[in-house]
Amino acid sequence: MDSSARRMAIEFRLSLGLLALLALAPLAIDNPYWLGVLIVSMYFALLAAGWNLLAGYTGQFSMAPACFAMIGAYTTGLLAYHWKIAPALGIPASILAAGAIGAILGLIVLRLRGPYLALTTLSFAEIMRLVIGNSYGFTRGDLGLNVPGLLESRLAYYYVFVAVLAAAQGGLYLLLRSRAGLFLQAIRDDEIAAASRGVDVVLWKTVAFTLSTAVSGLAGALYAHFSQLVSPELGLISQTGLVICMVVIGGIGSLVGPLAGALLVYVSSEMLREAGGIQLIVFALLVILIARFFREGLWGLARRALGKAAA
Amino acid sequence: MNTPSRQWRLAVAAAAAGLSIAAPAADPIKIGISIAQSPPGSVVQGTQVKDGLEIIKDRVNKAGGVLGRNIELVYEDNQGVPEKGRAATEKLITRDKVVAVTGGHQSSVCLAEIEVAKRYNVPYVNTNCWSDDVRKKEYPQVFNPGNYNSRVGLAMAETIAAMGVKRVIAFVENTDYGIGQAKAVAEALKQKAPNVEYKYETLDRAGKDFTPAVLPLRANPPDMILTMLLPPAAYIVMNQLYEQGVAPSAKTWLYDGAGIADYPDFWQNVKEAGKYMLEFGLYHPQMKTPKLGLEVAKTYQQRTKNEPNRLIFQAADSLLLIVDAIKQAKSTDPNAMIKALETMKFEGVRGEFRFSKEPGYKFHQWVDIPYVNYQLTEINQPVSKSLLVQAPGIPLAVGKLQKPAK
Amino acid sequence: MLNLDLFINGLIIGLFYALMAVGLTLIFGILKVVNFAHGEFYMVGAYTYTLAALKLGFDPWLALPLALAAGAAAGWLTERTLMRPLYAGYSSWGLMRDEYAVVVTFALSLLLINLVDKVVGPYPQRGPGLVDIPRMALGPIMLSGQKLVATGISLATIAGLALFLRYSFWGRQIRAVAQNRLGASLAGIDTTRASSLVFALSGALAALAGALLAPIINASPDVGAFPAIKSYVIVVLGGMGSMPGSIAASLALGVLESFGAVYISYDYRDTFGLVILMLVLIFRPQGLFGERGREV
């Protein structure tokens, strides 16, 4: 196993460790409020993982992860609200809808790079949010859409999220370990070189988009049934900003960075909130410092320390 | 493997666990308040609700509290957003263990919050959400001492009918309150003035420029424009209607249905645009107010140097209802409190009433809430000096209304 | 006459958009990156003006240049601390320079918004206007005194900027760097200085727009988000880096939105620009006036 494959294996085992911690946490925490906080941070962890696949591993800086969570949430929400369709069907529908729209978006932005890609996906996200927000006759817009619950107890929701998150991490690991993973990273590092070496750039970019948005859609659908209220707030650019913060702080382009980043950022943001609402200031500063001086994030710092300890 | 990130995670989990274990038996009775203290919510409303609640809280605690315990108000900022209102109410109930939730003043937020109140079976006193839908759901936990859209609809339709206008256009905010009130007026007009041509246009409450909506009216001005918006959008719309010379003008009346003329920042934001505006209101100093109400008004004026308005009184009544319910039930058990609220005769700062049990929009509502209609006739005019054209005991007299020269 | 009203109002709004967008165009021309914190320079200007006039008692006409200075300082500082790595070569992001710019300016935007929210408070602040005339007739149209003055100042500023870029020493240097950074430095131009100047200029222009519009669109922490999105649309529509292109695109967008709001859909008027942006990016990425990308 070469060093990057070994590194990925270590990262995967670390994420399993974090997931095990999450699975055991309810033994120590029985306050429903904090369980809720952890559930929402798992929602963000899913978004972060999906976005990391697209941006960290494939180099496509989309500004639309929150938008696809919103699409997923509204798909299942509207199906339930208007046609009384059960979540068992609604959630798969959300995954399909988000993935399909994501694939289309991926094809649209195929030839775009850098700021152009960011601007196009940003515009797309804003258009979606405005359209959903203004069609209040159908979606109830900013008034919010009530969505039926999926399960009885909060603990049940908790473990559903843990299971889905574990599956997502596992799936990502398998994908990235395979040849497909090599192709994606080749595209990120140098698209022209990759194409000249025979990598089907069109196919793999589209795959990356589809998988990333499908995961976001799934996260959104689960969140919809958990909070039982869906609003266009989910798709705000600032929500995307939060996801980007989480991934960059945790360590972009690593398997464990997004997971650790999401949990750390969201949980401490809830704790900092008590201290007077400075959480976003702290995180924005952290992101700037990390991006400016050390792009590999906290996980990268941890690895350095580990490397020094091992040496 | 003990990498720093993992240790960090352990520490966070332990801290979170520690927080949940440390919950000693609370001595004061906690009451949850969910209000808007930042945009896009109406911060002005939230602040006034808070002011009213604080006055009653201080009175009650000074008199020895309830059941020998002080009351403590736990505040959450819902930012006027339904999703945040839901989260705020959940937090208040599950983390702070409040015995009741109140303070709601924006309809879309209330609608999200009452779902949480119902799920956890916690009494919810709706301070100022006017949407009929809040009542129509008929949740036993929800009680409404404030105004409701159908009432405004009827009142405004009566005034419109009496004034004999033919074409009416309404600008409403894209919320349950705005759209609900627009529809309530439409319904009432069908009964009271079926010949009136009426249509409404929804505006984004977070919008900053409404000129595109106002400009088409210059060419073809209606007889009357209704506004059902909260600040800051309300102020921007009024200013732009005035800037374009559309309303108030010799041709077009301006009639506000959101009761904003008594907000403390009204005049500094609209200046000339507010002169000649008709106002549907829920409070006027010339109304007959019970002694308790007058005392609360005086305290408010001392504390803030502003004239009191309906939000203060509604907030005061909300808290008094909860306090009285606890006294009557002799406990903070939710079911006992709900039973008390349903059956008791309440004497508050605005009058005395019982909650109705009729289905639909009258459920758990103070049906005969008093209201007024008045007109502002000078810039910077306090409500006490405005022209009162209708009040409980004073029949509607539209002949007195004034119009600008051009 | 409704159409005349819509046209003129569209032009006025377009002029304000132009003030915002030219700064962003300049930055893109020089650095080939989009500054996602541009809206916050607008916000800085709006707050500096409003707070100076309201809390410090400045005369509005003095608060205006103060806002300009604040914007310039913010722009210069941003370039100095965050943007240098893009061309000075010492960034750990290596090849992903565009992504670095996206992440870092995005985070800066988040930081500024929340900092202001915490320090000043989230409630919108309304400052005094430059002139105290709530409404006046100008031929067939009606507008407020503030709008008229703001329009005049914007017009003068944009004209001044155009002259500066075309004829002044530094203006020509900036244009040279925008055309070809490497070539310009070989020709002896201080490209770093040029970049600093452009960022400061961009910040100042955005801040001016914020200050001029503050009495109309009150200052609040997120007041910059809305003009920022418009600017992104315009910069791409006009051809990233083309000054006349972005001015033309600004006016066109203003007029389009004005008519579209009345004749097509009021609710969706903000989406017109975004939809056109997406279409342009897909079919004509160089914008309406720009040149096909030149990559070294």
Image (cartoon, rainbow, N blue to C red):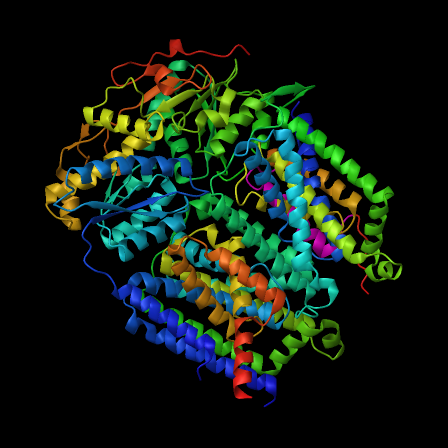
The picture places residue B241, in percent across and down from the top left corner, at: 54, 24
Residue at screen point 75% across, 33% down: C156
Q: Is residue A264 above or below residue A307?
A: above
- Give the image quarter of residue B103: top left
Within the magenta stretch, is there residue C292?
Answer: no
Magenta stretch, main secondary structure, is helix
Q: Quadrant of the C terminus of chain B?
A: top right
Quick one: which residue is furthest to the right in this view?
C187
Q: Residue at x 63, y 75 (%)?
A: A184
Query: Where is residue B53 shown, x and y percent of the image?
Result: 28, 38
Q: Nearer the viewer, residue B105 or B285?
A: B285
Q: Could you tell me residue A201's position as x and y percent?
A: 69, 72
From this view, report whether residue C204 is shown above or below residue A171. above
Q: Quadrant of the N terminus of chain B?
A: bottom left
Of the pair B195 and C219, the residue shown nearer to us: C219
At a point 60% along the width and 83% down the height, the residue shown is A4
The reply, left or right, for residue C157 in relation to residue C230 is right
Please give left or right for residue B174 compared with residue A296 in the image.
left
Q: Position of residue C49 (x, y in %)?
A: 60, 36
Using the rendered image of the protein, determine whether residue B229 is visible from the camera's viewpoint: yes
Q: Is residue A111 visible?
A: no
Q: Which segment is the magenta one?
A: C263-288
